[in-house]
Amino acid sequence: MRLKDKVCLVTGASRGIGRAITLTFAREGADLIVNYSKSEDKAKEVANEIVKLGRKALLVKADI
């Protein structure tokens, strides 16, 4: 729980490396801002996984 009570923003969090980083941060105790630009369904899947890990997830659509 190295990131307990921290909030992390991960760009491209709905797939690939961004998804892996997002879930790792959640496992370490962080709440997440899940950024995506196209894959809303995939972003929602990631958010659901974060919530299952007991953390909070906020979805944000933005082209960064």
Image: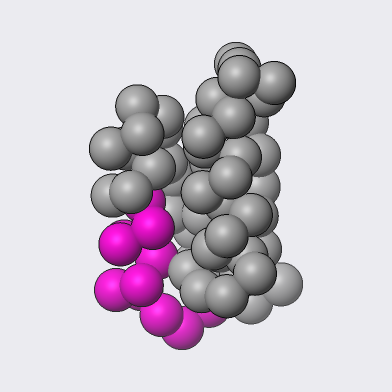
Q: Quadrant of residue 51?
A: top left
Q: Quadrant of residue 24?
A: top right
Could you tell me which residue is drawn at 41 percent across and 80 percent down? 39
Question: In the rendering, at what x and y percent does residue 5 appear?
Answer: 60, 16
Q: Is residue 17 magenta?
A: no
Could you tell me which residue is drawn at 33 percent across and 48 percent down? 49
Could you tell me which residue is drawn at 64 percent across and 77 percent down? 63
Q: Tell which of 64 and 43 is nearer to you.
A: 43
For residue 50, side relative to residue 35 (left or right) = left
| Quadrant where the image shows the C terminus | bottom right
Q: How is the image coloured?
A: one colour
In the rendered view, tell whether residue 41 sits above or below residue 29: below
For residue 62, side relative to residue 38 (left or right) = right
In the rendered view, tell whether residue 19 sits above or below residue 50: below
Extent of the magenta region: 37-47
Per the picture, the main secondary structure of the magenta-coloured stretch is helix
Q: Is residue 39 magenta?
A: yes
Q: Quadrant of residue 20?
A: bottom right
Q: Tell which of 50 and 57 is nearer to you.
A: 50
* Res 62 seen here: no
Question: In the rendering, at what x and y percent does residue 57 appear?
Answer: 42, 41
Looking at this rendering, what residue extends furthest in the bottom direction?
Answer: 38
| Quadrant where the image shows the N terminus | top right
Question: In the rendering, at what x and y percent does residue 8 appear?
Answer: 66, 39
In the rendered view, tell whether residue 28 sits above or below residue 59: above
Q: Tell which of 51 and 58 is nearer to you.
A: 51
